[in-house]
Amino acid sequence: MADVTCANCREPWDTHHLRYDAIWDTDLRESLKRRVSNEGANIKDREQREALERDGWKFGGSLLSILRCPACKSNEERNGPLDPEVVKDREMRRSVLADILGDDEDGLQSELEDLDYLDQ
């Protein structure tokens, strides 16, 4: 599995962690956490998405399209805020790719890796 980065702070996140493990940091009930650990997270499920958002996550149209993450606050405190126009552009590109590629997570992951390379 590869990493995808946050559009805001550029923190890398392992895709397996996003799909199966990040839910354990949320306030969801144990039975739902176990189900997500077996089936993978689905941000189209309102309860899962809201729990992840309470934990600091914000996504575009896909779990792999990270617009904000739990590391953003500490990265901003350490390095200062990023240029809002740069962040807005990164968010827009990630969201558009997620919308275009839909459920093709392998294709989205590949395209996001290309975006990360171009953003350097």
Image (tube, grey):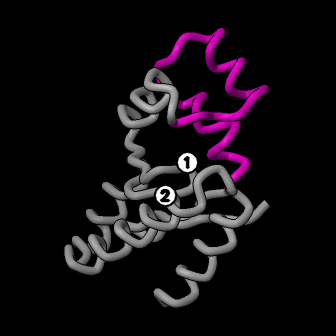
Nearer-the-camera pick, 25 or 16: 16
Magenta-span inclusion, residue 18: yes
Circle 1 Cα neighbour tier, 10 Å, few/some/many (<14 / 14–19 / ≥20): many
Q: Which residue is mark 2?
A: 99
Disc 2 on helix, strand or loop? Answer: helix
Magenta-span inclusion, residue 120: no
- Residue shown at 45%/34% (left/top)? 52
The amino acid on which the numbered mark 1 sits, given as a three-letter code, is: Leu
Q: Is residue 111 left or right of residue 59?
A: right
| Mark seen at residue 63 | 1
- Residue shown at 75%/28% (left/top)? 39
| Residue 15, position as x, y percentages in the image | 68, 54
Magenta: main secondary structure equals helix
Kindly indicate whether the residue at mark 1 contacts the one at mark 2 (C-beta within 8 angstroms): no
Nearer-the-camera pick, 43 or 19: 43
Q: Magenta residues?
A: 15-43
Residue 69, compared with residue 20, is above or below; it is below
Q: Label 2, label 1: how many angstroms apart (C-alpha)?
A: 12 Å
| Residue 81, position as x, y percentages in the image | 22, 71
Disc 1 on helix, strand or loop? Answer: loop
Displayed quadrant of residue 29: top right
Q: Is residue 12 left or right of residue 109?
A: left
Upstream in sequence: badge 2 or badge 1: 1
Nearest to the eye among marks 2 and 1: give it.
Answer: 2
Q: Quadrant of the N terminus?
A: bottom right
